[in-house]
Image: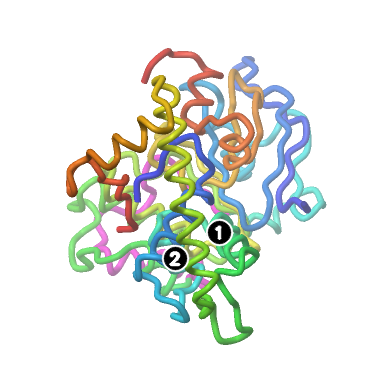
Amino acid sequence: MDSLLEVKGLYKYLDGRSVLGACSFSLAPGHITGLLGPNGAGKSTLLRTIAGLWRPDGGEISLHGRPITRQDRPKVAYMADHTLLPRELTVHQAIRWYRDLFPDLDLDRFRAVSGNLPEGEPVSRLSKGQAERLDLSLLLARDAEVYLLDEPLGGVDPVERAKILSAAAGVMEEHNALLMATHLVHDIEPILDDVLFLRAGHVVLSASAEELRQREGLSVEEKYMEVFGGGSR
Amino acid sequence: MQFSNSVPIYLQVMEDMKREMVTGGLPAGSRVESVRTLAARYGINLNTMQRVCAELEREGLLETRRGVGSFVTGDWERLSALREEMAQTLVAHYLKGMAGLGFSRLEAAERLSGEEEDGGQSAGSQRAL
């Protein structure tokens, strides 16, 4: 399958310490990939480097087979693990503010993921879950090709989270790829096409979720336990 | 729908839709929702749902009419054959389980006829939402 985004031999050092070492993998168009690994494995660093916030110290990132350039950046949408919306704005104003930054915002997509949010409330008064939902919906409403999510919806209860993620999966198009770092393997398992296991800055597994189940009879969660240890869950 | 962990999800969803087809939730000839809607309802990704529909089509249970949508087959024989297949799978599963406990086929059969009408036959009623 043609890859949308390809990462080849990516290296990243932070404070003289190697955080990513020879990371290679690719994201297929139309696929949702889970980036899994213990704390400190380098998940956030990997996402930030792909997003262009950090410069790689080695290796190559390409989009549609060509090295990614500054002009490509709008095609890569990145969501940090904390909100960047001005907290004093109301939800309604925050949406407009975001739309000024990204004029191609698709409001239908936004609403499909956001559901009902209290539009008159200031962002600062939203619950943690609502704020995360707002962030995620805005990001996915952008007309990007690659979406990078760092620990989305950590503050949302499991039932709601499953609902929102399934709505998120629903707005993905065939030319989109989504890569999300998460600890919540169990909850998101049904919406993942592929998984990427990261350990100490190295990709230790890159596989299709259904193939894991079919070939090894293991869920992603079970495979995770097998690879990273930790015994019973 | 709650998924079992280690069986491919597409197989589990296929199983669920087949059960709907033989029990009337998805009647013969009826229109099936779009892949996108189904994916959202099952809480799975689009590609998996696409695979489910493609496989059901391959098995002659779904028919796609270009530009119109997908429909459950109107072929009653196909659907009753499906019901038969599903029953056979259950029976084989039961017999295998009983054999594993050391019961003969005859004993397994006697067990069944001795079973109370409404007792002990909650055949794993997992259904979509």
For label 2, the SS is: helix
Quadrant of res A22: top right
Q: How packed is label 1: few (under 14 Cα within 10 Å), some, or many (20 or more)?
A: many
Horizontal side of residue A8 vs B71, given as left or right = right
* Magenta-colored stretch includes residue A155: no
Could you say which disc has been placed on residue B52 in the image? 1
Q: Is residue A220 visible?
A: yes
Q: Nearest to the eye among marks 1 and 2: give it.
A: 1
The residue that disc 2 covers is B38
Horizontal side of residue A13 vs B44, given as left or right = right
Q: Is there CB contact under 8 Å for labels 1 and 2?
A: yes
Q: Do labels 1 and 2 share a chain?
A: yes
Q: Image height check: is A29 above or below A192?
A: below
Chain on which label 2 sits: B
* Residue type beneath disc 2: Leu
Q: Image height check: is B7 above or below A132?
A: above
**What whole-number distance in Å separates the C-alpha atoms at marks 1 and 2?**
10 Å
Q: Image height check: is B70 above or below A146?
A: below
Q: What stretch is highlighted in magenta?
A: A77-105
Report the residue that reaches farthest toward the right: A66
* Magenta-colored stretch includes residue A90: yes
**Residue found at x 69% / y 57%:** A72
* Residue type beneath disc 1: Val
Q: Position of residue A170 (x, y in %)?
A: 47, 62
Quadrant of res B24: bottom left
For label 1, the SS is: helix
Chain on which label 1 sits: B
